[in-house]
Amino acid sequence: MLSPEHWPLGLTLIVFIASGAVIAVAGTRMARLADRLADLTGLGEAVFGAVLLGASTSLPGIIVSITVASAGKAELAVSNAVGGIAVQTAFLVVADIFYQRANLEHAAASVPNLINGAMLCALLAVPLMAATAPPITLFGVHPASLFLLVLYGFGLRLASLARDHPAWHPVRTAETFEDVPEEAITDGAGQGRLWMGFAAAVILVGAAGYLVGLSGMALVRVTGLSETLVGALLTSVVTSLPELVTAVAAVRHGALTLAVGGIIGGNTFDVLFLSLSDIAYRPGSIYHAVGEQPLFIISLTILLTATLLLGLIRRERSGIGNIGFESWLVLIFYAVGLAVIVLG
């Protein structure tokens, strides 16, 4: 196959669209298996969604960021990572529309989801601090990238402890959906088929993510668009399709906590894209190789996450168009942020 630097526009679009379709179809399969595996493992939907489902649906984005970072495309790598977190937060509002009984933030009340959201804000603050700190590196990697890995592990531990030994509980209402495991599968062959199906879907989205990364680099060349625009508006949206598909499918299946946990937990995991991209980017610290726009996207994402957290804490039962006030704010802030990026 020709190097992406030599792909014509037609081939670039075909690869980009076809890869996106594979990601969407495989993501649907992962959603159906994830809810059952959450019960099987005993982790519960919030923790399972944050760890295994969140990491698996994030695989295309990981591969895109690593691929383009290793090719020296720092802004494309960072914009793809944080742009994916922003659009996935907006996707949660889309999933909310499909749940007709009440606002999703009200029904899927969960202490682990609140902790993951708070940790996401903390994780996103680290690259902002790194970008304004001295460009110190250790073997070409900024210390902030290593700190992100430690902080992420600490957050997972907190979420797990909060699930097993919560210090407080959300007030139960008629619309509250409790994460109660279904009857577990006892047949070993049945369990194995579930895991094999999940693994196959992960491999498919991973391969498709690699092709999205190649086509993203080609799009920068053939369209003349900036790396930030391609990363924030194109590759991040396509690689985030599993999150949209799994969130909507989980809501329609009744796995509300899994839907919210998959998005918030996946977003928390997605911050690690920056650590992996920094390792793959060999000229130095990736945080000091980007301009103002990627840092603006990080700030926007913190705003979106904080707004979502307000919705999860406030737990408004109903709102305009079946979504609450905070969900509308998420959409408005995201739209305004995109407009600033495009016009900037």
Image (spheres, helix red, strand yellow):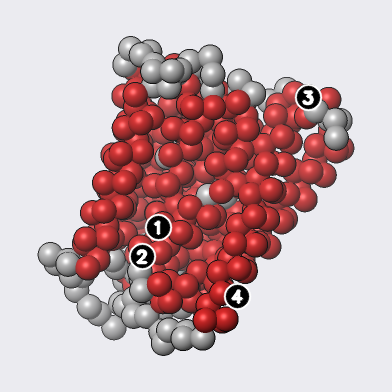
Residue under numbered circle 1? 50
Q: Earlier in the sequence, mark 1 or mark 3?
A: 3
Q: Amino acid at mark 2?
A: Ala
Residue 310, position as x, y percentages in the image = 27, 54
Front-lying residue, 306 or 116: 116
Looking at the image, residue 340 lies above or below residue 166 = above
Name which of mark 3 and mark 4 comes first in the sequence: 3
Cα separation, mark 1 vs mark 2, equals: 6 Å
Q: Is residue 250 visible?
A: yes
Q: What is the CA distance from the residue labelled 1 to the residue labelled 4?
A: 22 Å
Q: Which mark is residue 5?
A: 3
Q: Earlier in the sequence, mark 1 or mark 4?
A: 1
Disc assigned to residue 314: none
Q: Nearer the viewer, residue 136 or 134?
A: 136
> Crowding at label 4, few (<14), some or many (≥20) Cα neighbours within 10 Å?
few
Task: Choose the circle earlier in sequence order: 3 or 2.
Answer: 3
For the residues bearing labels 1 and 2, Cβ distance under 8 angstroms? yes
Name the residue rendered at 78%, 24% in the picture.
5
Kind of residue at disc 3: Glu
Q: Find numbered disc 4 in the image and state the secondary structure of the residue it sits on.
A: helix
Amino acid, disc 1: Ala
> Which quarter of the picture shows residue 190?
bottom right
Residue with the most extreme front position: 188
The quarter of the image holding the N terminus is: top right
The residue under label 4 is 193
Judged from the image, the secondary structure of the residue bearing numbered disc 2 is: helix
Mark 4 vs 2, N-terminal side: 2
| Residue 183, above or below 272 | below
Q: Residue at x 60, y 40 (%)?
A: 63
